[in-house]
Amino acid sequence: MGRAKLYQLDAIILERRDHGEADRVLKVLAADGRHDLLAHGVRKPRSRKTGHLELFCRARMLVSRVQNSWDIISQAEAVELWGKLREDFVRGTYARHVAELVLRFFEGETEPALFELVCKTLALLEETPEPERLLRWYEQQLLGLAGFRPEWRMCVGERAGQPCRAPLRPRPEDDHSYGIDFERGGALCPECAAQVAGANGGLLSPSALSWLQALQREDFAALVALPFPARTAGELARQMERYISYHLERRLAALRMMREYRREYRQESRADAGQGRDAERSESLNGDLEGGPGDGPEDDYGTSS
Ligand SMILES: [Zn+2]
């Protein structure tokens, strides 16, 4: 059988970069995996493909197979545009985080579940009033698909050379902190957490740990109505950024961009808002501001794959 020269692809555009005079190279995700494609002439004002191949949109494409080069997009029709992800800076930056994790953790062929997860997350990101909660859920689901599923239900620590494996059932009234161990990939019971003093992780509040368990176990719809305190949200954002950076051995560019944006936003609101409103805003944003990811090598999003 000869190779088909044309094939159809239903894919999400994760990254675009300009190529030559008027072309773009697109990194996309489809149900069967990642593809790098060339969109000829797409930057010309009269290209029929323009508007159908926007960042983070989902498009149906007809693609020509090319030997020893990128396959070429012959036709494209946008199926989902998710306009707010490009119009709204905050949502757009979170969409970048969604794409960045796919590009960093996966290459080549992937499970259809990854495509479904990314479609679902981008669709929810377009609407949700609480993108932070959604991102934390996405991260837990994605780590599972990538083969880095963290262990939040049983202690990953060791005592006297033996695995601890204590079941973890955090309650809000617990007066001990739990721990997070990046290297072993999971949570620590209060006794193990007290022993290691956070060289490779840190402490985890009972509320944050019970959220991690729920984010891993539940569908997002089941989590929407639960109270998600700002303090817990901030702790989860910090710890998961460090956790993921540790495993990728690099910093996460989109989350760093978001922190810088919020830092500026907070300075501006200090300068021009009323005292009471300012305090309120700082409170709600505070979670994300303190602390940064581990010292990984610098790499800006999109410069390599
Ligand atoms: Zn333990």
Image (cartoon, rainbow, N blue to C red):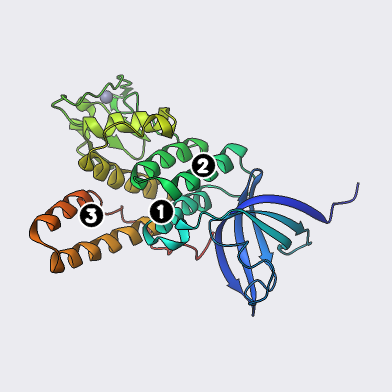
Q: Nearer the viewer, residue 171 or 272?
A: 272
Label 3 CB less than 8 angstroms from ligand 1: no
Q: Residues within 10 Å of mark 3 (few under 14, many from 20)?
A: some
Q: Amino acid at mark 1?
A: Tyr
Q: Nearer the viewer, residue 297 or 227?
A: 227
Q: Residues within 10 Å of mark 2 (few under 14, many from 20)?
A: few
3 or 2: mark nearer the eye: 2
3 or 1: mark nearer the eye: 1
Q: CA distance from mark 3 to mark 2?
A: 28 Å
x and y, in percent, of residue 10 in the image: 67, 49
x and y, in percent, of residue 293 in the image: 30, 53
Question: Among all residues in the image, which is located at the extreme left?
Answer: 275
* Circle 1 residue: 94
x and y, in percent, of residue 221 in the image: 42, 32
Q: Nearer the viewer, residue 228 or 191?
A: 228
Quarter occupied by residue 178: top left
- Who's the residue at 78% across and 62% down the image? 66
